[in-house]
Image: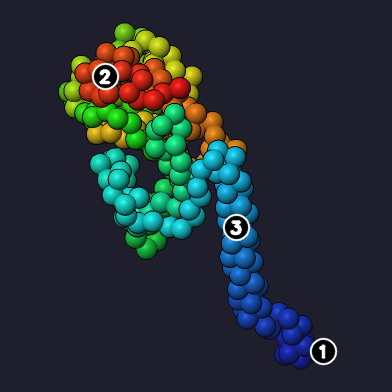
Amino acid sequence: MPPERFIAAAPPVLAQGPALLFFLFIVLVLAAIVYGYYAAMKRQDALSKVALELGFEFHPARDQTKIGGRFDRINLLQEGHDRYTENHLVGRIENYSVVACDYHYAVGSGKNRSDHYYGVVFVEIPMQMPEVRIRQEHIFDKIAAAVGFEDIDFELAEFSKRYYVAAADRKFAYDLIHARAIEYLLEHPDYCWEFESSTIAMYQSGRFKPEQIRPAIETAVGFIRLVPEFVWQERGMSTREDRHVT
């Protein structure tokens, strides 16, 4: 058979290769969209059940208002663009208002865009607090310290080595982060913390799994129980009875 006859007899599938590949690509994209939708619905159903167990309300809708502006002073909610919260579990524990939710923001655009997701617990308490931020220390913090931008150090070297602490009022930071609170933070290393005005925000990188919601809320409220009585008297309600803490 002449070479040109051999080429003409090539299988039809090979001749249609680009079209077939494009078709398969579209099928895969649609399958990914459908899978993502059903996975999201399944997670929302699980979160709704967690809310019911806690006696909370569940509001899945996306919110770009920083939950009605209640938490607009929290630094995490100032990052990037395309910011929103969703899948809100809303209720009260020990008379504190609690919101647990997903949070998203984006950095960059087009091919350089990156999306960041967090699981956040907000707790509102009857105390006016100057800003305090607590998170795991990064290599860039060590570089900043080398040129004079030092964070607050504490007596326990392990804590100072692992955590970056910044505060508008150093005395308040030391009053808040006492020896037992330091132990508590070391026992829960996955979370970052922000204290601002009357809000405590505790968050982790990545959305909460449904089974992580209750432990996360308990961790946030557990820290509040460690706040010394004299701090409450100086900056918040004067007695434990006034706060209706059980």
Amino acid type at circle 3 is Met
228, above or below 134, in the image: above
- Residue designated by label 3: 41
Q: Which quadrant is home to the C terminus?
A: top left
Q: Could you say whether the residue bearing mark 3 is in a helix, strand or loop?
A: helix
Q: Within 10 Å of the Cα at label 1, are there few (<14), some (14-19), or many (20+) other Cα atoms?
A: few
For discs 2 and 3, the disc positioned in front in the rendered view: 2
170, above or below 118, in the image: above
- Residue designated by label 1: 1
Residue 237 in view in this figure = yes
In the displayed structure, does residue 9 sit left or right of residue 55? right
On the image, which quarter does residue 76 sit in?
top left
Disc with the residue nearer the chain's start (1 vs 2): 1
Q: Are marks 1 and 2 in contact (CB under 8 Å)?
A: no
Q: Which quadrant is home to the N terminus?
A: bottom right
On the image, which quarter does residue 6 sit in?
bottom right
Residue 171 place in picture, x, y as percent: 20, 16
Image point (54%, 31%), residue name: 215
Along the line of sight, the residue nearer the viewer: 49 or 146 = 49
Q: Marks 1 and 3, how far apart in space?
A: 60 Å
Q: Could you say whether the residue bearing mark 1 is in a helix, strand or loop?
A: loop
Disc with the residue nearer the chain's start (2 vs 3): 3
20, above or below 66, in the image: below
- Residue designated by label 2: 238
Image point (32%, 23%), residue name: 242
Residue 156 place in picture, x, y as percent: 36, 9
Amino acid type at circle 2 is Ser
Disc with the residue nearer the chain's start (1 vs 3): 1
Residue 108 place in picture, x, y as percent: 33, 56
